[in-house]
Amino acid sequence: MGQKVHPNGLRLGITTNWHSRWYFSNKTQFRLAVAEDMRIREEIMKKFTSASVVQVDVERQINKILVVIHAVKPGVIIGKGGKGLEDVKATIMKFTKRLALKKAKDQKIDIKIEPVKKPFAVAYYVAQTIADKLVRGFSHRSTVHKAMNQVIESGMKGVKVQLGGRIGGAEISRREKYFEGTVPTSTIREDVDFAIFPALTKSGYVGVKVWICRQS
């Protein structure tokens, strides 16, 4: 039986950092804050799919919330004259009403948009790109190989992609793995990024897993 560990969780505090950065000693506040962060993250990534949001970090203080959005196309979120930022702030306010540190109206919400300079160095973006093309009916082999070539051209040490499900509309589900370069998943000091993204094709869901080993 395989003993598998999430590559990002294995490297927390070594090569990766927490996406939620705060501390509450009160168990009720801790529970509510975790749930709020999850809802904020899911809503922003769902609402701004066209901006290719790859990561959302949440930092909390007593009366302040800082939300850092990492996006490949930050202009889509900002919008004309910064109108998009007001939508983001309204979305965050909707999910911060339950946490009883202070009243939601007294909490200051700051939003920071960080552009992603090398999108093909981020596993989530690569997985999303592959999934989008699978949904549109592209050949899975050519799609995966093209994505892996772009990852290597971005200066990465290696990339691994795994597809699982009814690939290409097959009657029986299967798994296919593709490798290029080196991806030492057991070496904790290696900077390995990992992401999962589902592709809802006409035949059902196809899971896309991507591992990217960056230059250390």
Image (tube, helix red, strand yellow):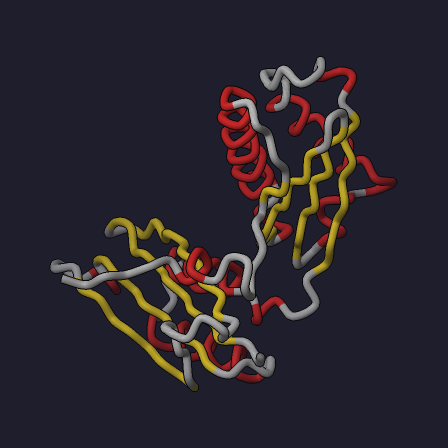
Nearest the viewer among 39 and 64 is: 64
Looking at the image, is 128 positioned above or below residue 21?
below
Q: Position of residue 48 (x, y in %)?
A: 61, 43
Name the spot of residue 186 as percent of width and height, x first. Answer: 36, 73
- Seen at 73% across and 54% down, the residue is 114
* Nearer to the camera, 59 or 139: 59
Give the answer, above or below, for where 138 lies relative to 207.
below
Q: Is residue 162 above or below residue 74?
A: below
Quarter of the figure that contains the C terminus: bottom right
Left or right side of 17 for 61: right
Q: State which quarter of the image contains the N terminus.
A: bottom left
Specify whether 53 is left or right of 74. Answer: left
Residue 163 appears left or right of 59: left
Residue 195 placed where, x, y %? 44, 59
Q: Position of residue 181 (x, y in %)?
A: 43, 86
Question: Residue at image x 23%, y 61%?
Answer: 3
Residue farthest front in this picture: 25
Q: Quadrant of residue 33?
A: top right
Number of numbered tags placed on the structure image = 0
Residue positioned 28% across, 74% down in the render: 177
- Residue 184's image quarter? bottom left
Work out whether 79 lies above or below 108.
below
* Residue located at (32% from left, 52% from top): 201
Task: State the residue lying farthest toward the right.
Answer: 81
